Image (cartoon, helix red, strand yellow):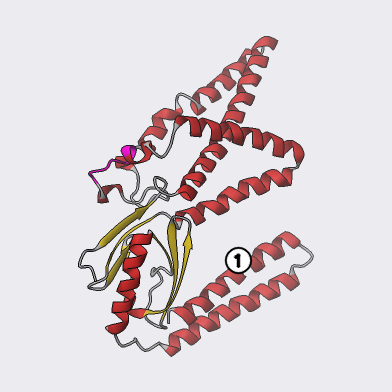
Amino acid sequence: MSDRRVEWRIDAANSRFVRWVVYGWLGLFGGGSLLAFGLVASGALASALEGEFGRFAFLVLLVLVGGPFSVLYLWPAIRSETRPPRSLFVPDSAADPEEPLADRYAEAFSWRGAITSIVLSALALVALARFDGRALLAYVVLWFVLLPIASGFVVWGRVDPDEPSLEYRTGAVPLEAVETVRRRRLGDVVVYWLSYRSGTRRLSTPSWLTLTPEAADALDRALEAAEADEAEPRSSNRAVRLVAVGIGLSFLGLAAAIWLLAAANPPVAVYGSLVTGLLGLFFCWAGLALA
């Protein structure tokens, strides 16, 4: 058993999937901005040719605000020293001061890839809009779905098989409380799904872990060591569990009632039952998993 801790970091610089999602979002916003810029510029040109200089001046102002002037308020947001450490695609720049973020991402991204993604996305937006508005909506929703999935693969941590301990993102994982482990290799990463004994985890304790193969081997050894030194499980609070599950079932019943009573108004029925139903599922899950 090695006495050295294993550190790892997965982000857009070394994950093809996360890098693909970043390019996709760059294309979505860049392609949309390119189309909007083209529409406004063509409108300004038409206004100038028609002699409507008031509308021409307004459209030119829109182009400047969305173009050169936008650098004034976008630049502070994209500078690495002002970016929040919990950004979706930037792990923790302060954790590795020897490797500036710009240097780390310079080899992963290119101007050719960025321009290609913007142009292809602009063409896709135009084609989908001409084909079917629902297809355009599905395309946009797809990238909004991929964003939180990709953020789950942006991780950094440290595992010590000798202690044993696991630091994952900004917190520690209680390895001695792990009950079942599911592991699957996905390309260049290893994904774990951990189940904990009742009453031993917190709301912030992660169940889905993403590690490099080297860190995954170290985690396997740490889990084996934790089983040999397993702590006594904390007794579950039955009263809290009953209250949480009762609240959850009440919300689920309310969701069913909203669905039936507001059937004549489908938007209200769907929204009301969806919101209350999700609250009910959350309370039921919290009562069963956390209490």
Front residue of this view, candidates 186 and 193: 186
In the image, taking residue 133 as reference, residue 239 lies left or right, namely left
Label 1 SS: helix
Residue 201: x and y, percent? Answer: 38, 76
| Residue at (26% x, 73% y) in the render | 164
Please tell me in which quadrant of the rendered image residue 48 appears. Answer: top right
Q: Is residue 64 magenta?
A: no
Quadrant of image for the N terminus? bottom left
> What amino acid is labelled 1 in the image?
Val
In the image, taking residue 123 as reference, residue 79 lies left or right, namely left
Q: Is residue 174 visible in this depiction of the protein? A: no
| Residue at (34% x, 54% y) in the render | 9
Residue 142: x and y, percent? Answer: 61, 50
Q: Is residue 257 above or below residue 216?
A: below
Q: Residue furthest front?
A: 1
In the image, taking residue 123 as reference, residue 111 lies left or right, namely left
Front residue of this view, candidates 145 and 221: 221
Front residue of this view, candidates 129 and 63: 129
- The region drawn magenta spans 97-103
Q: Is residue 19 above or below residue 241?
A: above
Residue 30: x and y, percent? Answer: 54, 34
| Residue at (57% x, 48% y) in the render | 143
Q: Is residue 220 above or below residue 188?
A: below
Q: How many marks?
A: 1
- Disc 1 target residue: 275
Q: Is residue 178 visible in this depiction of the protein? A: yes
In the image, taking residue 114 as reference, residue 225 lies left or right, namely left
Quadrant of image for the C terminus? bottom left
Q: Residues within 10 Å of mark 1 (few under 14, many from 20)?
A: few
Residue 223: x and y, percent? Answer: 33, 75
